[in-house]
Image: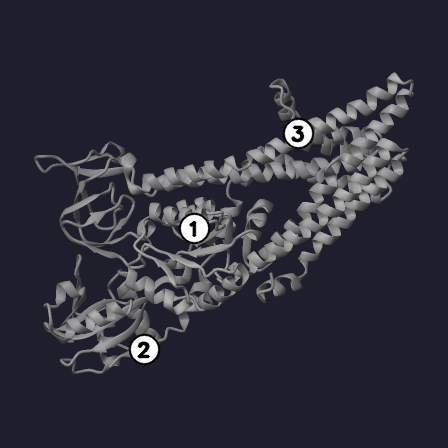
Amino acid sequence: MTTELRVPGAAAAQEARPSRVAAWWRSGAGSLPEVRWAVAATALFAAGGVGQLAGAPAWVWWGLYLACYAAGGWEPGLSGLRALRDRTLDVDLLMVAAAIGAAAIGQVFDGALLIIIFATSGALEAVATKRTEDSVRGLLDLAPERATRLTAAGDEEIVDAAVLEVGDIILVRPGERIGGDGQVVAGSSDVDQANITGESLPVDKRPGDEVFAGTLNGVGALRVRVTRPAAATVIARIVAMVEQAGATKARTQLFIEKVEQRYSVAMVAATLALFALPLLWGVPLQDSLLRAMTFMIVASPCAVVLATMPPLLAAIATAGRNGVLVKSAVVMEQLATVTQVAFDKTGTLTEGRPYLAGIHPLPAATEGADGLLALAAAAEEGSEHPLGRAVVQAAREAGLTWPGAESFESVPGAGVRARVGGRLVEIGSPTALLETGGEPAAVVAACEDGGHSAVVMRVDGVPVAVLALADRTRPAAAGAVTHLEAVTGATPVLLTGDNPRVAGRVAAQVGITDVRAGLLPEHKVAAVRELQERGARVALVGDGVNDAPALATAHTGIAMGRAGSDLALDTADAVITRDELAAVPAVIALARRARRLVVANLAIAGTFIAVLVAWDLFGELPLPLGVAGHEGSTVIVGLNGLRLLRDAAWRRASGGLS
């Protein structure tokens, strides 16, 4: 007989967990000079705009706009001058020159707007760079700096983990993080290695088993023989893979830099020619300068920038209101091209916390399921093991009461032993509490074949029940998978470090057929690259340290905000702040709509620029008309892009329309 247990409080408990995303976003950004200057420039720009609209004296709002020039433009201007020294012309210097030219002919507002756009862009880039560097450094903190090494005489000495050599024996006490990759030579314990393998439950370790640096030891003491030097541990390889993936992504920006360089050179050359050549033909200096400045205004990419940014920024704002933090406009563009989504399991498709799925009473049991659960809760109440907490929580949710244990003992690597009402209650792994063969062993095998973790309960030495534990699938997971298949045209893939039976059970529940289990971090990276080699643009959704290299390698990395590790949050391109999987297909559909608006806006902006430039080159374009056309195109594309700010945009994306 199997009793299925429901834990209705689990969702509420998840909601009650404090969000770490706000702290992640705030930390460190305010200390960056690029951010401070961008904020100052924006404030001065806003003050100038208010003064101009309020009818203040011209010198007041002109002074504020020029102060905005100084705050937001000095750094890109200085950078551009340094580039000139190296015989390189970049678009930042061009924009500063265009802004100064605009001010020279009285269009100080246009110039200040250009300054704000580029100062804000530089600030966002600086924040992203700092967070990436901090996250990689923070990853190294997972591995302890020191370890207890045993000498040949058996004495203990505290040494830096970095100096451990292959063959050294280290002592790992209960609750400590393991100092190096190695093999257990003595002792038994349970080790939480979710940050490396993604396994949702602690793993029993005995002599001969492998352990990893940075994983958390449980209640037993272990002696571990180091098998890899510090530079070659799994955690060190994760760092290297994250850095390598970041460098690979950076190289993709070289094409953009080449386009910027060529555009800058062409625009400067054309402006100088428009100024100098007419002088040779006897055109007055003022007329020649006016034509050149008009050209610089109408040919400036302000409208093109705004053609691209408003739809993307509006989509970012709408996604943010609905629980998705997209870190930049570039990420929103990348989301629009995703053709394949890959999911981690633990903490992503599942909640990452074990629960009691059922109780299987054995023939020797004298109590029913409720009585056995109450007895198990009494024995586990003093345990800090996740499985013990799951048993106690299930009993509380079922409204059961139980007597206090008269004695309690945690047996490393085996389970717990307690005396309740004069009876000896033992709960632990089947290998420790069961003999091979027989009905109890068959029940255990059936549980494990079903994708559950099996725990045996004995009373006075006699097996009375098998407890089935599992990690609960998120309620919206199946719907999200179906929606993603409709949006991208491909069924998502499951990439997990957990065992194939558990992975298969979760995949079957959510509708995924392509399952790759037992993966270490480097294997996840290889799986992502394999999908990319097939032509897929992969978005990986994960939450743990072990997902970070794959998040960095994927076309777009998406992290779960509440359960996600700091490294996953920093490495990912987007964060699901409420841990709602339905937001994944919705944000991809929203990004695709934003991309369509960008294409439409670029066509509008390009047409305006082409017409105005041709008019200025081959006719007599009045400056006021050129400014009006330039600003008119900016307003049109801006308003068109802001359509995505409406709530209807997210509802449409959530409904599966891409």
Disc 3 residue type (three-letter) = Arg
Q: What residue is drawn where x is 52% and y is 47%?
A: 25
Residue 260's quadrant in the figure? top right
Element class at badge 1: helix
Mark closest to the chain's N terminus, 1 or 3 = 3
Towards the viewer: 438 or 178: 438
Crowd around label 2: few <14 · some 14–19 · many ≥20 (10 Å): few
Question: Which is more foreground, mark 2 or mark 1?
Answer: 1
The residue identified by callout 3 is 262
Whole-percent x, y for residue 189 in the image:
19, 54
Q: Which mark is residue 503?
A: none
Towards the viewer: 529 or 559: 529
Q: CA distance from mark 2 to mark 3?
A: 67 Å
**In this rendering, position of residue 503 left or right of residue 118:** left
Element class at badge 3: helix
Mark closest to the chain's N terminus, 2 or 1 = 2
Q: What residue is drawn where x is 62% and y is 39%?
A: 121
Element class at badge 2: strand
**In this rendering, position of residue 465 left or right of residue 86:** left
Q: What residue is drawn where x is 88% and y is 35%?
A: 623
Disc 2 residue type (three-letter) = Glu
Q: CA distance from mark 1 to mark 3?
A: 34 Å
Whole-percent x, y for residue 617 in the image:
84, 31
The residue identified by callout 2 is 4
The residue identified by callout 1 is 531
Q: Residue furthest front?
A: 534
